[in-house]
Image (tube, helix red, strand yellow):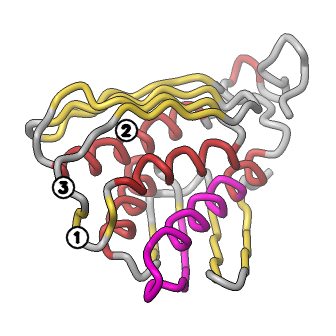
Amino acid sequence: MARIATVKRETKETKVTIVLNVDGKGISEISTGIGMLDHLLEQVARHGRFDIKIKAQGDLTVNEHHTVEDVAISLGKALREALGERRGLVRMDHAIVPMDDVLALVAMDIGGRGYANVDASFAKEYIGELPTGLIKHFLQSFALEARLNLHAKLLAGEDDHHKAEALFKALGRALDDATEIDGRITGEVPSTKEIID
């Protein structure tokens, strides 16, 4: 069964459409109006081997917050819908990603409980057009909507661009591994409760 979802979210502040194919090849078409956010989401697609199409229009004349938040919510919802009952999933995994001066860790459990612990600080207020304070908010909003437990931590590094990019590469890698189907339990829900909701 194809693990694909389409999500449309329209509010007074934003209009977001996302198509996510979990079993893709890393192809992305992303346009949010925030170049650095597009760049980070391309990392998730490429390193997670997801095909992701995102078209977002937001009230960027106000600020970037609503667009970043609603893209995160929509992407989380798309992942949750694409995975369905989560049968056969590896479910828990992690990735440690180096990028020049930076070392980033992301660990997750796609177990139905939305939670995020993000330990990441940045020296500057912005990376390109993206407020660095919204990186943590994006990860939190995504995890809550996807109903996954996410821990993201910067272990080393100085360059803000590298910090953000390494975190999103690690997110992609961890998602790729956690969403794989474990051939030993195909069709089974990977939980002693026999349900993930």
**Which residue position is annotated with label 2?**
170
Q: In which quarter of the image is residue 36?
A: bottom left
Q: How crowded is mark 3: few (under 14 residues within 10 Å), some or many (20 or more)?
A: few
Residue 136 in the figure: left or right of residue 110: left
Q: Residue at the spot x=67%, y=51% of the render?
A: 79
**Which residue position is annotated with label 1?**
128
Q: Who comes first in sequence, dot 1 or dot 2? A: 1
Residue 97 in the figure: left or right of residue 34: left
Q: Disc 3, disc 1: CB below 8 Å? A: no
Q: Where is residue 163 in the image (x, y as percent from the top left)?
A: 23, 44
Q: Disc 1, disc 2: CB below 8 Å? A: no
Q: Where is residue 26 in the image (x, y as percent from the top left)?
A: 44, 58
Residue 114 in the figure: left or right of residue 196: left
Residue 65 in the figure: left or right of residue 83: left
Going by the picture, which residue comes out furthest to the bottom? 61
Q: What residue type is labelled 1?
A: Gly
